[in-house]
Amino acid sequence: MDCRELEEYLYEQIPLSKTMGVQVLNAGWDEVKLTAPLRPNINHRDTVFGGSMSAVAILAGWALVHVRLRQEGIRGSVVIQRNTMNYERPISGDFTALSSVGDSAEWQKFVRILKRKHRARIPVNVMLFSEGRKAGLLEGHFVALGAEAS
Amino acid sequence: MDCRELEEYLYEQIPLSKTMGVQVLNAGWDEVKLTAPLRPNINHRDTVFGGSMSAVAILAGWALVHVRLRQEGIRGSVVIQRNTMNYERPISGDFTALSSVGDSAEWQKFVRILKRKHRARIPVNVMLFSEGRKAGLLEGHFVALGAEAS
């Protein structure tokens, strides 16, 4: 799944991603990297609305699990179960969201459980950056449902 | 501050609120109640995108502190510092977000610190409902900055 394919999928399936101006910069196994501009996400302080920071971070986390399952040849549907979000500094321009999962053993365990029980949970971290500085951190737990081979 | 005034403020200052179709049902001292429809917030499973659930909950939490400060005659700017969010069940229609703060002593302490130090933090809980059932819970910490009498 390349950047453009993921971007089109997001725009079609989650239209708020388009409204927020999200673009996909990387859709790889190790990370998904999204970017969004200030303007559609602006708040009363002329910085990025916290809800947009959370939403873009959730998209980046969700997309990483989605992309990896596709690469594994597994058709599973991914949803968020819970998250914590720290807003570390205000963002007054474009920002990026960079997602990652733990080590390979953790991922393999997730896939094993998903195949056996058709439901498994995986933690994903997403860092937000703007102007070269970290601006926030989301720690999310995502659940994959179903595990048919595609 | 009545519902309409808050709604106009949100639409103007945080345009994503308008895109998400947020409407203000109550803007009182005890609670702020917002509602939003499925359509602009839909995801790949035809339910409400987790990022929209978070964003509407953050708005409801933010608005309650904003409304209360206005009623206290304090001009302070409110931002979110951190939150946890639990997505308890999928939402497949309209949903509401209902925010509340702790007891009166907690609020008074917050106002006292804000007036003295021009910065204070307050926890706010926001419950999400759809079709009469609880669908999620956000526990947020908001920070108010500045405390000039208006």
Image (cartoon, coloured by chain):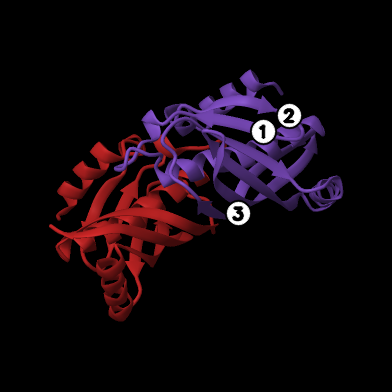
Chain colours: A red, B purple
SS at mark 3 in the image: strand
Residue A11: image x %, image y %? 26, 39
Disc 2 designates what residue? B28
**Quadrant showing the N terminus of chain B:** top right
The residue that appears at 69% across and 21% down in the rendered structure is B2
Mark positioned earlier in the residue sequence (3 or 1): 1
Disc 1 designates what residue? B32
Question: Within 10 Å of the Cα at label 1, are there few (<14), some (14-19), or many (20+) other Cα atoms?
Answer: many
| Chain ID at mark 2 | B
| Chain ID at mark 3 | B
Q: Looking at the image, which is closer to me, A110 or B36?
A: A110
Q: Amino acid at mark 2?
A: Gly
Marks 2 and 1, Cα distance to the nearest angstrom?
6 Å
Residue B74: image x %, image y %? 79, 36
- Which mark is nearer the camera, 3 or 1? 1
To the question of a shared chain for discs 2 and 3, the answer is yes
On screen, residue B118 versus residue B56, left or right, reads right
The residue that appears at 31% across and 42% down in the rendered structure is B45
- Which mark is nearer the camera, 2 or 3? 2
On screen, residue A42 versus residue B107, left or right, reads left
Q: Amino acid at mark 1?
A: Val
Disc 3 designates what residue? B81
Q: Is mark 2 in CB contact (under 8 Å) with mark 3?
A: no
On screen, residue B32 versus residue A123, left or right, reads right
Q: Is mark 2 in CB contact (under 8 Å) with mark 1?
A: yes
Question: Within 10 Å of the Cα at label 2, are there few (<14), some (14-19), or many (20+) other Cα atoms?
Answer: some
